[in-house]
Amino acid sequence: MDTHRILFVCMGNICRSPTAEGVFRKRVEQRGVEHQFEIDSAGIGGWHIGCPVDKRAQQAASERNIDLSSLRARQVCVADTQYYDSIIAMDNDNQLRLLELADEPHRHKVRLLLEYADSPDNLEVPDPYYGGENGFDLALDLIEDACHKLLDQLLAQRLAKHPRPR
């Protein structure tokens, strides 16, 4: 079975998208399907290239046994839009910029993370960078919920394409 390549994208790749990468990676490991996924994250802007994840995001994730300490920010590029099977944006602005970056045949891959969440009223993961400490927990709550359902959907799609022999 082929590997599904998934990229999470936010503005600077130091808060929301690396958090989503870490959460999704943990979910994949818990389900024992690591071999089925390649998981990464990137930012629209290049301001933080090479920087670690924001300490507040690391702390919030660490309290839920998610380690983001090895992740470093990078900027998304056109090649990413061609390479990855799913490109998951944290908010409408990120999604718009990704759609502008991607060539027409790859735009269908770009989705909002919260399209997979329970509460479709709000489709944006709020950026906790300029907010208070609680903003990181709120973002993490939304990301965890959506990543759980995203993984369920991707596994169901893979099973439909590659049914197990009886």
Image (cartoon, rainbow, N blue to C red):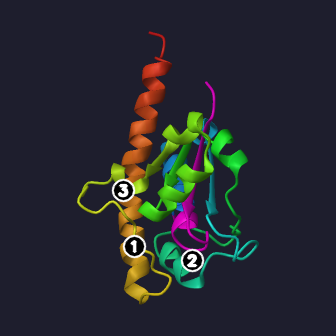
Left-right relation of 76 to 92: right
124 above or below 86? below
* Residue receiving disc 1: 126
* Outermost residue, top side: 166
Q: Nearer the viewer, residue 141 or 97?
A: 97
Query: Is residue 73 within the magenta segment?
Result: no
Q: For the magenta stretch, what is the residue range?
A: 1-19
Q: Residues within 10 Å of mark 1 (few under 14, many from 20)?
A: some
What secondary structure is found at the residue carrying circle 3? helix
Query: Is residue 18 within the magenta segment?
Result: yes
Q: CA distance from mark 2 to mark 3?
A: 21 Å
Identify which amino acid the numbered label 2 is placed on.
Gln
What secondary structure is found at the residue carrying circle 1? loop
Q: Nearer the viewer, mark 1 or mark 2?
A: 1
6 above or below 126? above
Q: Residues within 10 Å of mark 2 (few under 14, many from 20)?
A: many
Q: Position of residue 13 (x, y in %)?
A: 61, 69
Q: In which quadrant is the C terminus drawn?
A: top left
Q: CA distance from mark 3 to mark 1?
A: 11 Å
Left-right relation of 104 to 147: right
What secondary structure is found at the residue carrying circle 2? helix
* Residue receiving disc 3: 114
Q: Residues within 10 Å of mark 3 (few under 14, many from 20)?
A: many
Identify which amino acid the numbered label 1 is placed on.
Pro
Residue at image point 74% right, 72% down: 49
Chain-order first, disc 2 or disc 3? 2
* Residue receiving disc 2: 58
Residue 32 in view: no
Identify which amino acid the numbered label 3 is placed on.
Leu
Q: Position of residue 97 (x, y in %)?
A: 55, 58
Q: Nearer the viewer, residue 150 or 96?
A: 96
